[in-house]
C-alpha cells in the first residue's frame, strides 16, 4: 500500500502545513505505509530535507485574489497539469491520497486527473476542509455565492471520480462541517486537522511554578489580532506585578508584513514580555506552548466564526486554558466547559479585561482544561482517521486472480 500527501501550500517550516505533514508522515510510518508528499514549487530546502517533499505546485489557496471570474478555471488547470505530472512520476496511483488543506481548486484538479486515468483503480481520499470557499471570509458572507457554485462543481466531480464511500472529509468546527455537508454532499465529520499532537507532546505538567505566563504563538496574520497586544499587555502589566507574557508571531512573508512596529513596541515593554518573530521548529513550537499557563487568541470573530484554529487544538490536547474572542466558533466549547474566557469587546481594553479575569481564576480553569485534555485524547485524532482509511482501502481491494492471469500470460 502507498499513500501520497498533497498540499500545494506546503513551503516552509512552521505553521499548520509543515506540522500537518510532519504528523501525517509520523502516523503513516507507525502504520507501516509507504508514503510520499507533494509540496509547493517554492518549498525551501528545509522542507525538502525534513519531509522528503517534492516541489510541485505554483499556486495554492492563499494565492487567490477572487477578483477575476476566470481565476478559478485558470488555477484548476494549472494545478491539474502540475498534479498530473507529479502523479505520472510517482508511477501507479497511490492507494490513499491525503489532502490536509483541500479547497475547491485542488478538489476539481484532482477529479480531472483521476478521470483521465480511467483504467486505474481510484485511490481512497482523506481531506480536511479548513476554510470557507474564500479563505479570508466566514461561511455566511453573502458575496460567496459564486464560490459556493465552484465548490458544488468541484466536489461533485471528485465524488464521481472516486466513487461512493471513497472520500473521508473533515472540518475543524461544527459550523464549517454543516456548511460543507450541504455544499459538497459529503458526510463531513468534525476532527482537528493533523498537528503536533503526539503522546509525548500532548500533556503539560500538572502544576504551575512561579509567575503565570500568558502566551501567543503563530503567524501574525491580520485576523489574529496582534495589533491589539501592546496596549492590552501594558494595561495588564500595570495592574499585575507577577504575570509574564511570551509573544511569538511571524510577520515577515505574511499578509501582516507591516506589523514590524507592533513587535518593536512589544519588545520595549520590559523584561516581563518575551518576544520572538522567527519561524519555530516543531521542537521549539512545542517548548513554547509547554511554558504557557494561558493562551491568548484575540482573533477576528468574523473570519473565525466557523473556521478552526490549529493552535487552539494543540492547547486543548495539552490542557492549556485560553482567552479568545467571543464569536469564534472553534472556542465555544472551552467557554461552555469553563476553561476559556471570552473577549467580549475586541479592543485593547477588552483584551486586557479578559486576561485579568482569566488570571483571577487560573487554577480552576487549568484543572478544567486538563480534564478536557483527557477527553480530547480519546476522540478522533489523526492516527484514528488514518487507521480507518487504511482499513477501508484494504477492505475494498479486489482479490487477485492469479490463476486467470497465469493462464492469460503463459497459456498454462
Image (tube, grey):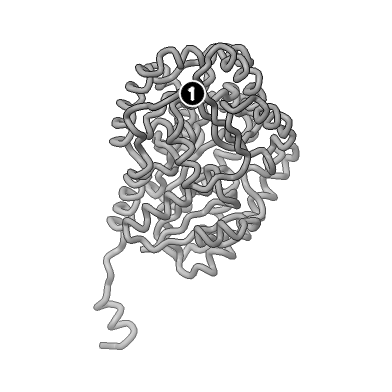
Image x and y of residue 184, in percent? 49, 38
Residue underneath mark 1: 329
Residue 323 visible (yes or no): yes
Identify the image quadrant of residue 199: top left
Q: Is residue 304 above or below residue 36?
A: above
Residue at the spot x=32%, y=29% of the render?
206
- Extreme-bottom residue of the structure: 411
* Local SS, label 1: helix
Image x and y of residue 367, in percent? 32, 22
Q: Is residue 384 left or right of residue 23?
A: left
Nearer to me, 92 or 399: 92
Residue at the spot x=65%, y=22% of the render?
230
Image x and y of residue 342, in percent? 49, 15
| Quarter of the rendering occupied by the N terminus | bottom left
Identify the image quadrant of residue 279: top right
| Quarter of the rendering occupied by the C terminus | bottom left
Nearer to me, 217 or 409: 217
Q: Is residue 192 above or below residue 85?
A: above
Q: Is residue 43 above or below residue 315?
A: below
Residue at the spot x=43%, y=32% of the render?
315
Residue 134 visible (yes or no): no
Badge 1: few (under 14), some or many (20 or more) residues near its Cα, within 10 Å?
Answer: many
Residue at the spot x=65%, y=54% of the render?
77
Image x and y of residue 216, in percent? 54, 30
Nearer to me, 358 or 210: 210
Amino acid at each position: 500500500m502507498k499513500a501520497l500527501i498533497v498540499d500545494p501550500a506546503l513551503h516552509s517550516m512552521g505553521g499548520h502545513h509543515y506540522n500537518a505533514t510532519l504528523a501525517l508522515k509520523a502516523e503513516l510510518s507507525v502504520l507501516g505505509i509507504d508514503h510520499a508528499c507533494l509540496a509547493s514549487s517554492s518549498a525551501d530546502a528545509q522542507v525538502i530535507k525534513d519531509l522528503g517533499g517534492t516541489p510541485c505546485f505554483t499556486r495554492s489557496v492563499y494565492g487567490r485574489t477572487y477578483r477575476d471570474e476566470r481565476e478559478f478555471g485558470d488555477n484548476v488547470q494549472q494545478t491539474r497539469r502540475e498534479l498530473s505530472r507529479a502523479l505520472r512520476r510517482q508511477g501507479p496511483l497511490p492507494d490513499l491520497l491525503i489532502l490536509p488543506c483541500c479547497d475547491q481548486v485542488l478538489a476539481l484538479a484532482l477529479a480531472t486527473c483521476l478521470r483521465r486515468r480511467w483504467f486505474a483503480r481510484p485511490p481512497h481520499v482523506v481531506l480536511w476542509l479548513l476554510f470557507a470557499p474564500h479563505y479570508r471570509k466566514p461561511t455566511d458572507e453573502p458575496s460567496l455565492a459564486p464560490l459556493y457554485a465552484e465548490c458544488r462543481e468541484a466536489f461533485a466531480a471528485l465524488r464521481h471520480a472516486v466513487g461512493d464511500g471513497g472520500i473521508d472529509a473533515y472540518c475543524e468546527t461544527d459550523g464549517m462541517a454543516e456548511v460543507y455537508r450541504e455544499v459538497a454532499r459529503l458526510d463531513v465529520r468534525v476532527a482537528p486537522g493533523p498537528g503536533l499532537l503526539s503522546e509525548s507532546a500532548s500533556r503539560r505538567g500538572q502544576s504551575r511554578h512561579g509567575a503565570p505566563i500568558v502566551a501567543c504563538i503563530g503567524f501574525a496574520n491580520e485576523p489574529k489580532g496582534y495589533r491589539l497586544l501592546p496596549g492590552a499587555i501594558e494595561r495588564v502589566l500595570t495592574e499585575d506585578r507577577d504575570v509574564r507574557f511570551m509573544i511569538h508571531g511571524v510577520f515577515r512573508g505574511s499578509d501582516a508584513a507591516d506589523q514590524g512596529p507592533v513587535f518593536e513596541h512589544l519588545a520595549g515593554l520590559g523584561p516581563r514580555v518575551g518576544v520572538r518573530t522567527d519561524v519555530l521548529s516543531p521542537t521549539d513550537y512545542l517548548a513554547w506552548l509547554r511554558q504557557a499557563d494561558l493562551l491568548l487568541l484575540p482573533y477576528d470573530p468574523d473570519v473565525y466564526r466557523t473556521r478552526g484554529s490549529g493552535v487552539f487544538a494543540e492547547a486543548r490536547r495539552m490542557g492549556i486554558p485560553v482567552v479568545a474572542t467571543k464569536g469564534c466558533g472553534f472556542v465555544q466549547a472551552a467557554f461552555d466547559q469553563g476553561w476559556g474566557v471570552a473577549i467580549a469587546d475586541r479592543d485593547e481594553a477588552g483584551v486586557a479585561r479578559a486576561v485579568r479575569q482569566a488570571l483571577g481564576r487560573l487554577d480552576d480553569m487549568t484543572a478544567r482544561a486538563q480534564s478536557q485534555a483527557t477527553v480530547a485524547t480519546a476522540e478522533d485524532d489523526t492516527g484514528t482517521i488514518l487507521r480507518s482509511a487504511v482499513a477501508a482501502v484494504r477492505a475494498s481491494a479486489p482479490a487477485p486472480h492469479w490463476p486467470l492471469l497465469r493462464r492469460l500470460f503463459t497459456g498454462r
